Image: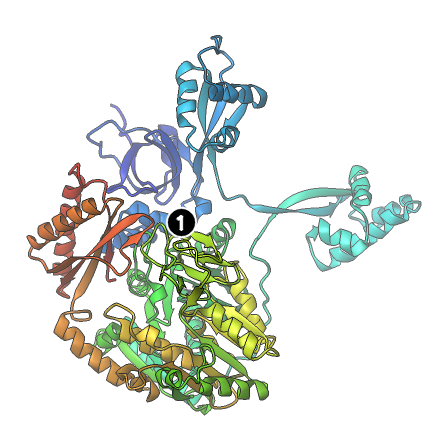
Amino acid sequence: MSSQVTYVDVILPLALPQAYTYAVPVELVPFIKIGQRTIVQFGKNRYYSAIIKRVHHQQPPVDAKGIEGLAEEDAIVTETQLRFWQWVSEYYMCTEGEVMNAALPAGLKISSETKIRFNESYEGEYDSLTEEEFAVVQALRAQTELKVPQVQDLLKKRNVYPVLKTLFNLGIAISSEELVERYKPRTESYIKLNEKYSGEDELEKLYDELSRAPKQVELLLAFTQLHHQTKFIRKKELLQRSKSSAAVLSALVKRGVFHEFKMEVSRLGNLQTQEIADTALSAEQKEALHSLNTQFETHHTVLLYGVTGSGKTNVYIEKIKQVIAEEKQVLYLLPEIALTAQIINRVRKVFGKEVGIYHSKFNHNERVEIWNKVLRHEYKIVIGARSALFLPFADLGLVIVDEEHDTSLKQISPAPRYQARDAGIMLAHIFSAKVILGTATPAVETLYNCDHGKFGLVRLEKRYGNIEMPELEVANIKEETKWKRMRGSFTPLLTEEIGTALKNKEQVILFLNRRGFANYQVCKTCGYVYKCKNCDVSLTFHKFRHELVCHYCGYYEKVTTKCKSCGAIDLDIVGMGTEKIEDEMAEFFPAARVSRLDYDAVKTKHGHTEVIAKFENRETDILVGTQMVTKGLDFDHVSLVGIINADQLIHHPGYRSHERAFQLIMQVAGRAGRKNKKGTVIIQTSDPLHPIIQNALHYDYKAMYERELIQRRQFHYPPFSRMMEIKLQHKKIQTVEQAALYLVNETRKLNKGLVLGPAIPFVSKINNQYLREILIKSSKQSKDLSAMKQGLQQVLDKMKSLPELKSVSVSVNVDP
């Protein structure tokens, strides 16, 4: 009787609609676990990074290939994670392979690199080879093997595959797959004393033997002193302490006095575990914490709705203490890495080494270490951006989503296009954990869920220490421009207030949600505007790079003095960005120290931390920034906040623009007057009577919320519907239009919702791809949304089978 064959269904890191089944060799069956990485061959490529999803004995309809091995003994993905991956893929209409790609750090994805070797058994001639083919053969004979990038460098061309194909076909070269694990542990050299000198008598004899080598004695003495302080002594530290050279140490190693060995060390650095006295909760914060616990008795998710500066973080920390005491883990989600520096310091001072940090600025190896520490339960608290959702938590007890209204919590591209707030609520549900959504300006949908009993609600209506809310004032750009009183981008009121703040040794934050120096460059003679050659947008002028840059595809041109169209030298730059504001501040207030906090300024891992630290330490007087400066940062000495152009926020396309404009104004206003005194906020606008400006002046969130609900109910927008946005792109405009019309017509036949479009988007071409958009509105019932998704997927699958439309790229954004 033959024994049953064991099969595994695996998830491959590709956009594949299903898991693939492989047979397990008998010798590996006892070691198979769900969540392990396994080596499988798929097509002509080989991947290490397939994850075992299911183990079973059901024979597939076609013969299954065998797995080629296991990447490690233990699972790196938990079964709970796999459930979460499946939910993300189903809800956000993507594949589990795409979720896997988003979830796993690149260091845990083992790639295969093709190596080309010379075939030593080849005995044929080389007369028929081209010059390029013969050059590769000569290089192979000299170096034994080459990788594809080396061949590209050799031939100075990108497409070398025809050359390699000829060599493979003739049998001159052979290829092999070398599996490369990207994660390599970091090691350091350590020194230990030979065990035969461990006794005091033996050590004394050794000192006598070395008496004629004073430098070796000094080094041995330094080792003895260090050994009293720590068990493991780093080579680098020993040499520094003894002020000895590597040659002296090497001589002692050769003599057998010391042994040198390598040990794996963390890339994450040693955390400061200094603890500070707990910040005493105010009476209102204590009441909020009590209300939070009461609300959790009947609600899975609670909104902590507190004004800026009310001390929501203090409440979070007290709640985290309660969860940690229950031996459970906490996920603390933040929308931007710019926020993490201050929050991390506050949380670490309380919880020390139990805190881990996870965001995209860490390199591949650091992310693998954090992943493993979470998996081993070494981190009880993880602070991170949205990608931290995918870490392998063992027993999650609490998810905190700070600034829950923030747009940065939504992944735009690539798939999965998930909303971290909503996905965090589902992750918590899988663990039976609780969720705190914190904000001073809730998303309309969130407060609507509170009003209808889906979420609990706790309010913090006073600033910590009873500090007054900042005073908001309007500066009329239109009026000041009319009377020629503007100074660059600044009204007289804002300029005067900045001068006063600097005179009083106080700090200033200036907010403009556009990076770069100016919107575009134009010729005053012929009106030519410099545009991106790949996209349907003008190029943004960056003064410090002296370039015109496309913020969509990255294309750039050097700035010229003559018009490309007519040759005139009368070129002008129009509009403003953060660079221009920084430049003008340096000109108007030359004694002031000015820094900038935007995407261009914080590209390095610690860039944002350095800018914030300088401002905190009062090494900077004026901080100019994009929306990074609006998000929860707490500075002691900021007395003035200036919003350079509020109109730019209000008149942005999209049904959420008024809500987001109000949120941004309120958030940036909250940075003023944090600790010492009441702050001031100057809002520059050409429309002071606009409802959003008036609501902001009176801190009237309720009026904005009620007006938004009326409009959204009328036009069937969330929270009164569920939405999906379909984007199509193709290099040919006729093809993308044909595909868009096909999708609209077929989707309308489903009768599962309102289908709008196809429409030409605000930016109609990006990276030489023409774009079209379709919007689908469905009822709030989950069964209706599910039916629409299933029908839409069938339509998309059918479209992919049509030869004339299958090359069109389609992306679906659920809850845009």
- For residue 281, say whether it is visible: no
Which image quadrant for residue 803?
A: top left
Question: Is 582 positioned to the left or the right of 37 in the image?
Answer: right
Dot 1: few (<14), some (14–19), or many (≥20) neighbours within 10 Å?
many
The answer to whether 364 is drawn above or below residue 441 in the figure is: above
The residue labelled by disc 1 is 104
The answer to whether 813 is drawn above or below residue 321 in the figure is: above
Which image quadrant for residue 171?
A: top left
x and y, in percent, of residue 626 in the image: 43, 70
Looking at the rendered image, the quarter that the C terminus falls into is bottom left
Q: Residue furthest right?
A: 212
Question: Is 738 positioned to the left or the right of 139 in the image?
Answer: left
Q: Which residue is drawn at 48% across and 8% down?
A: 125
Looking at the rendered image, the quarter that the N terminus falls into is top left
Nearer the observer, 256 or 463:
463
- For residue 396, say whether it is visible: yes
Which image quadrant for residue 387?
A: bottom left
Nearer the observer, 477 or 8:
477
x and y, in percent, of residue 286 in the image: 41, 85
The answer to whether 15 is drawn above or below residue 643 in the figure is: above
Instruction: Give the SS element for disc 1.
Output: loop
Q: Callout 1, which amino acid? A: Leu
The answer to whether 49 is drawn above or below residue 403 in the figure is: above
x and y, in percent, of residue 777 in the image: 15, 62
